Amino acid sequence: MSVPPLSLHLDGAALAANWRSLAAMSGRAACGAAVKADAYGLGAIEAARRLVDAGCRDFFVATWAEARELAAHVPALSVLHGVREADMAEALESPARPVLNTAHQVARWKEAGGGVCDVMVDTGMNRLGLSIAEATSGLLDGLNIDTLMSHLACADEAVPLNERQRARFAGLAGRTAARRLSLANSCGIALGKGYHFDLTRPGIALYGGVQVPAFDGRIVQVVTPRAEILQRRCVKAGETVGYNATWTAPRDTEVAILNLGYADGYFRGFSGKGAALTDGKRLPVLGRVSMDLTAVQVDAAPELAEGDQVDIEFALPHAAAIAGMSQYELLTGMGSRYARIWNDQHA
Ligand SMILES: *Cc1c(COP(=O)(O)O)cnc(C)c1O
């Protein structure tokens, strides 16, 4: 069996542990999982399988194409974009529930005699959702609503908008026929009990995202890219490495060229800042990340040779800080050239 040249190592035990931590932090509320965008790039079916095994019941995707792929693998699925006219035939057949966002979507679902649905209410983000006035106007009468939800704009920040959204949402309790209320994304869970309602909807923290101190030590890394050395060379003092010659060797330097680049979501922000890891040693990126190639310094690892593989430093909070990007962008940008390899052994 040949080893794939470029892979993402996905820690199934870490994914399950992160869900259990978030479920515990959600208190009495059920804890779901946002698996839209192919589970933020990890692979929705494989991620969902492990989350179901851990005890997760409620899953969220963005589109009907995503729902089509996942519906048979999860107990309950909600489609956040709701139903466009073109989605109706598929939505009526699907076990997934649309999250109705607009008066048009509500009318469409009622007219078609659609079954159980969810409803999104906007409480201050001004992205998707009915206004509170619409939601309490009688518009929702006659719908069979499982979950009434809203979404926090700034859950990763301590700002007054969080409490404003929470209070507006809490004011809807008992004013619709919805069986459950749901407000919190990952960071919303960390805002405390008042934000949990009946169901929480973490995404990024499941996959190792740490945006608030409450997740330090509770949320662990899930995703580690692994790349292969295509060539090892000695760059003489005064020579340069890579496009635009941005790195000059101060002395003779051992360099390994790896088979990953910005087309794999190893973005240019890692130029001169990222690193590969081997045997606990950090091998810094030299010069500019190319589309398909990245150079790292390997003086500290004389044993590494052409054909050997190294892990890429990818702890999300650190990686996002050095790349100047969000943890969401790093995960969802990982691209299709990686073999996605799950390891479910407990470390
Ligand atoms: C993406 C999304 C989530 C998950 O958010 P995270 O910040 O990744 O935890 C929850 N709810 C809705 C409506 C979303 O769009």
Image (cartoon, helix red, strand yellow):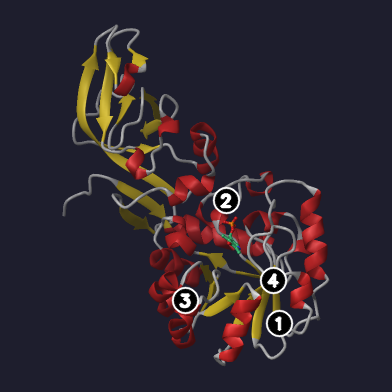
Which residue is the site of mark 2?
219
Q: Earlier in the sequence, mark 3 or mark 1?
A: 3
Secondary structure of the residue carrying tag 2 is loop
Q: What label does residue 178 carry, if any?
A: 1
Q: CA distance from mark 4 to mark 1?
A: 14 Å
Q: Position of residue 336 (x, y in %)?
A: 31, 52
Q: CA distance from mark 2 to mark 3?
A: 23 Å
Classed neighbour count for the residue bearing mark 3: other residues with Cα under 10 Å, few (<14), some (14–19), many (≥20): some
Which residue is the site of mark 4?
130
Q: Observer-nearest residue: 250 or 78?
A: 78
Q: Earlier in the sequence, mark 2 or mark 3?
A: 3
Q: Position of residue 214 (x, y in %)?
A: 68, 48
Q: Amino acid at mark 2?
A: Ile
Which residue is the site of mark 3?
74
Secondary structure of the residue carrying tag 1 is loop
Q: Visible in this render: residue 280?
A: no
Q: Is residue 196 above or below residue 90?
A: above
Q: Earlier in the sequence, mark 3 or mark 4?
A: 3
Secondary structure of the residue carrying tag 3 is loop
Q: CA distance from mark 4 to mark 2?
A: 33 Å
Q: Are marks 4 and 1 in contact (CB under 8 Å)?
A: no
Q: Is residue 6 left or right of residue 277?
A: left
Classed neighbour count for the residue bearing mark 1: other residues with Cα under 10 Å, few (<14), some (14–19), many (≥20): many
Q: Amino acid at mark 1?
A: Ala
Q: Is residue 168 above or below residue 82?
A: above
Identified at 40% across, 45% down, the residue is: 224
Q: Is residue 41 above or below residue 114?
A: above
Q: Earlier in the sequence, mark 2 or mark 1?
A: 1
Q: Earlier in the sequence, mark 4 or mark 1?
A: 4
Marks 4, 1: nearer the viewer: 4
